[in-house]
Amino acid sequence: MPAPSKSALACYARAWWLTKEAFLNYLYGGFGRDFTARDRTRFMLVTLTTRHWRDLVVATGLEEPVAALEKALGVDFAEEGDRYESRELLAALLDRWFADRAGAEVRAVLGRTSVLWTVYRSVAELVGSDEVRANPMMREVDQPGVGRYLAPGSPIRAGERPVVRAPVLGEHTAAVLAGWLGLSDREIRELHERGVVESAPREG
């Protein structure tokens, strides 16, 4: 099973709450959906390129029915738009293939292809997995008021961008007032005393 990509991890860690009901878990604009194996193992499968699609069709032995469907509809499934428009028909073919096989067999077949796929896991299973903890983009941070947890860095390589905890409310009040507004220590202290601004309590 392929390890989650850095981009996928970053998006998931920041937007795990996004809903997917609108397209019933289909990939918008191409072909991708979740499928369930005979033993109830759930897979998410995505084909972004012509190579992905051809590998999937060959690996699942669906060349003839897929070719017949293309001929009947007058489409070319090498085109992602055609795959999307016919997604329900294509998914129906694959539903039967997945339902006839155990999860271990599905893993073995898909593992020999270029197709993008993974097994569905809970948030706890994903975060606790060895491949996620070994991913250099992920680091454990100690967030005041929260505790220690895994946080993602940026999947974009743009120099050294270490993973750091989020600032707490008021942590940089003095630095902003001094650096951006040019206020002196006395002026900042007076603003605090008057209740105009407030800084985060010192740690420890």
Image (tube, rainbow, N blue to C red):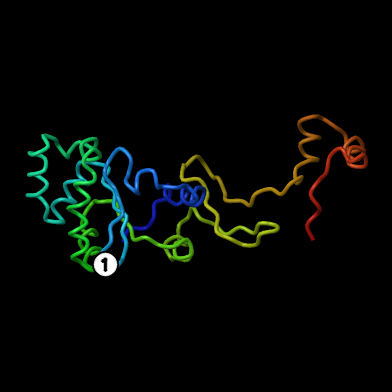
**Is 168 or 160 nearer to us in this picture?**
168
Which residue is painted at 15% across and 50% down in the image?
Answer: 57
Which residue is painted at 52% across and 41% down in the image?
Answer: 159
**Is 129 or 91 nearer to us in this picture?**
91
Rendered view: 158 above or below 98: above
User: Which residue in the rendered view is the most extreme toward the top?
Assistant: 181
Residue at the spot of label 1: 103
> In the picture provided, is 10 more to the left or to the right than 120?
right
Where residue 68 appears, x then y in whole percent? 7, 44
Quadrant including the C terminus: bottom right
Where residue 140 appears, x then y in whole percent? 57, 59
Which residue is painted at 75% across and 43% down in the image?
Answer: 172
> In the picture provided, is 36 more to the left or to the right than 120?
left
Which picture quadrant has residue 1? bottom left
Label 1 packing within 10 angstroms: few (<14), some (14-19), many (20+): many
Rendered view: 184 above or below 151: above
**Is 83 or 172 nearer to us in this picture?**
83
